Image (cartoon, rainbow, N blue to C red):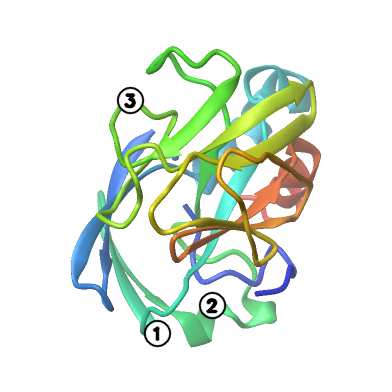
Amino acid sequence: MCKGSLRRRLFSIIVVLMPVIDSKEGEITEIETISVEQLSQELKDKGEEVFRRYHPHPYMFLLATDGMSDRADFLGPKTIQVSADSLLNEEKGMPEGERVVAVHKTHRNVFKSKITVGRAKNNDIIIRASKISKLHAAFLMEGEDSYSLVDMGSTNGTKVNNVRLKKNEPVRVRNKDVIMLWHYVFEFVDIDTFIRHLKENPS
């Protein structure tokens, strides 16, 4: 999958565990998510300077679940049925119910310099799917705006721009890089790009 416009995504995924039914695998996946609409409203209410103070970190949009059928059910406060064909239309802009994953450190584990990703509940980014390893991958914070991604020995693999990572060998991730964890495909965006997206797609 090549990198593309932020608008070209099937659906996006942060501090709610939102169940997602994988229509190919027939299992329920939970991903910790937050509503883009809420963040857009917060930016509007508080202004950019305050928003950046509370949200200095990158975000990830969920672009696709590779190999799924054209429909997926999102079960949360309300059910949203998502059609791949309709949401890939450039003219439609931000899809309803858009959600993202925050790439930031929590207090759930002892790894001070790692933002962990995996199935276990002590990860910083939780993806509760059977083919995601308990500790699948980790972002390494190498500076204020510099991040690398490392596969922590996952069973089903981690890719950056379609290149599979070797175990315990960090790879630098940059703005708009595409990250794949098993068949979950994300677009990594820095905070400047994310704020610009919120401004261009107000709630």
Residue 49: x percent and y percent?
78, 21
Q: CA separation, marks 1 and 2?
A: 11 Å
Label 1, on which residue? 70
Residue 188: x percent and y percent?
67, 49
Mark 2: which amino acid?
Leu
Mark 1: which amino acid?
Asp
Quarter where residue 195 is shown = top right
Q: CA separation, marks 3 and 1?
A: 32 Å
Q: Residue at x 59, y 31 (%)?
A: 42
**Helix, strand, or loop for circle 1?**
loop
Mark 3: which amino acid?
Asn
Q: Nearer the viewer, residue 166 or 122?
A: 166
Q: Residue at x 66, y 33 (%)?
A: 43
**Label 1: how many residues lie within 10 Å, few (<14), some (14-19) or many (20+)?**
some
Mark 3 or mark 2: name the one nearer the start of the chain.
2
**In the rendered view of the protein, which quadrant contains the N terminus?**
bottom right
Label 2, on which residue? 87
Q: Residue at x 65, y 69 (%)?
A: 93
Residue 99: x percent and y percent?
48, 51
**Label 2: how many residues lie within 10 Å, few (<14), some (14-19) or many (20+)?**
some
Direction from residue 144 to residue 31 in the image, left or right: left
Direction from residue 195 to residue 14 in the image, left or right: left
**Helix, strand, or loop for circle 2?**
helix
Q: Is residue 163 above or below residue 155?
A: below
In front: label 3 or label 2: 3
Residue 175: x percent and y percent?
78, 48
Label 3, on which residue? 122
Q: CA separation, marks 3 and 2?
A: 33 Å
Direction from residue 173 to residue 39 in the image, left or right: left
